[in-house]
Amino acid sequence: MAKRPSPSRIKTHNIYTPAEAADVLSVHKQTVRRWISHHGLPADKSRKPWLIDGVDLKAFLGHRKRKRRRKLELHQCFCLGCKEPREPYGKLADYAHQTPTSGMLTALCPSCGCLMHKVISRASLEAIRAKIEVTIQRADPRLVSPKDTPSNVPFEKERECDVKTQSK
């Protein structure tokens, strides 16, 4: 899927032709013309080439971007396969700590079976657990407490290996 045009690439003080706007946004010039004709992008059509004010173009793209956003319930995750917010399959999810204040909620999509992920705060974990069953994953002790990290090779065996290679 192609990337969506970003409103941040538009300069508000510039005036663009459809071809210039298409170059800046990395879309086809016919796409910009379609936005003007069918989707309500304001432009000066009194002469050729049509002129588009940068403020209007930026506002148009920003509105389209806001319209695509979805508000999720606290216990829902967004499925990238279905492109819809979904409640986890069987109301089951896993939570893994990432930082002291947040973690990753992982669940299966009930429609397509894809993994869904959602970053949540630790404070909201109890509210989520009221709606769905959440299993908290234990953190790997090596990552949590690096004070007593065991060595893979005991030092005695390491010295023996060095002595064997030196005697040859």
Image: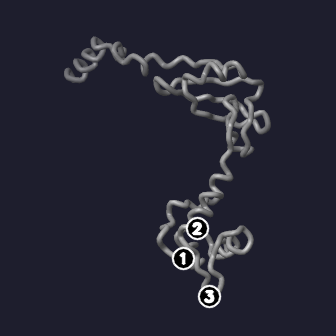
- Mark 3 lies on residue: 48
Q: Amino acid at mark 2?
A: Leu
In this view, which residue lies farthest toward the bottom? 47
Q: Is residue 3 at all visible to an observer of this figure?
A: no
- Mark 1 lies on residue: 16
| Total numbered badges shown on the rendered structure | 3
Q: Residue at x 54, y 76 (%)?
A: 16
Q: Secondary structure at mark 1?
A: strand
Tell me how far mark 2 sits from mark 3, CA to CA.
18 Å
Q: Would you say the residues marked 1 and 2 are in contact, meaning their CB atoms lie under 8 Å apart?
A: yes
Measured from the top left, where is residue 64 in percent x and y?
A: 65, 58
Tell me how far mark 1 sits from mark 3, CA to CA.
12 Å
Q: Residue at x 61, y 28 (%)?
A: 105
Measured from the top left, where is residue 13 in percent x and y?
A: 47, 71
Vertical position of residue 131 compared to residue 9: above or below: above
Vertical position of residue 43 compared to residue 149: above or below: below
Q: Amino acid at mark 1?
A: Tyr
Q: Secondary structure at mark 3?
A: loop
Given residues 168 and 54, the one toward you in this image is 54
Q: Amino acid at mark 3?
A: Lys
- Mark 2 lies on residue: 57
Task: Point out the image quarter for the N terminus.
Answer: bottom right
Q: Residue at x 54, y 17 (%)?
A: 138
